[in-house]
Amino acid sequence: MIIVTTDEVAGYEIVEVLGETMGAVAYNNYGWGSYTASDGPAAGTATRETLVQQCRAAAMNRLWIEAAERGANAVVGMRYDLSQLAEQLVEACAYGTAVVLRPRAEGEPGATPQSARQARQTNGGPGAPSQPPPTSPPWLGAGPPQPPPTGHQAPTSMPAPPAPRPAAEPPGDWPLPPHSQ
């Protein structure tokens, strides 16, 4: 699967457009405070960076899975958005257009060494461009979610919500930015 932000892939011809495809995931950031630009390293930036990386990896993996289920071997025009939907909810969305690519053979206008090599391997038919599925960065531990065996399904049980904070406890223990003290 090739996933690119451009509208074309050098060395390949789009032979079929399968339509918009996307992968979205929402994470509860309870206890991490709000995600604002004024927060600095003392405000738990490493934790927030981990959340952003996890969201991105999961959204990209879901995009890859959905495109493959539709019969695509590439996604063009891919975009990625990360937004805070509510005080405790972050959503990541990766989206683009699922397509079927045909590698251009050696001697064809626009052919590249990669496409010519792949055209030889697929006898000029649509190929499965050699790009592995996305994975989480190694520092995040377990990999990205794997597709369920029978397609996308809602979980059968939900994890228990975290215990509420005591009323007297402030929502965060981070220092205020210098301009607000």
Image (cartoon, rainbow, N blue to C red):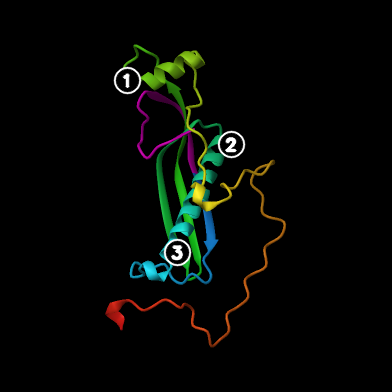
Residue 41 vs residue 92, the one in the foreground: 41
Circle 2: is it few (<14), some (14-19), or many (20+) Cα within 10 Å? few
The secondary structure type at the circle numbered 3 is: strand
Three-letter code, disc 1: Gly
Task: Answer with left or right where residue 74 lies relative to residue 110.
Answer: right
Relative to 90, is 131 above or below?
A: above
The secondary structure type at the circle numbered 1 is: loop
Q: Residue at x 45, y 16 (%)?
A: 119
Labelled disc at residue 84 = 3
The secondary structure type at the circle numbered 2 is: helix
- In the image, is residue 137 part of the stretch drawn in magenta? no
Q: Residue tagged by mark 2?
A: 69
Of labels 2 and 3, the one closer to you: 3
Three-letter code, disc 2: Glu
Return the x and y of residue 96 as percentages of the image width and height: 44, 42
Task: Answer with left or right where residue 146 lies relative to residue 156.
Answer: left
Q: Residue tagged by mark 1?
A: 110
Q: Residue furthest right?
A: 156
Magenta part of the chain: 1-21
* Quadrant of the drawing holding the C terminus: bottom left
Residue 23 vs residue 175, the one in the foreground: 175
Return the x and y of residue 25 as percentages of the image width and height: 53, 54
- Tell me if I can see residue 59 in this picture: no
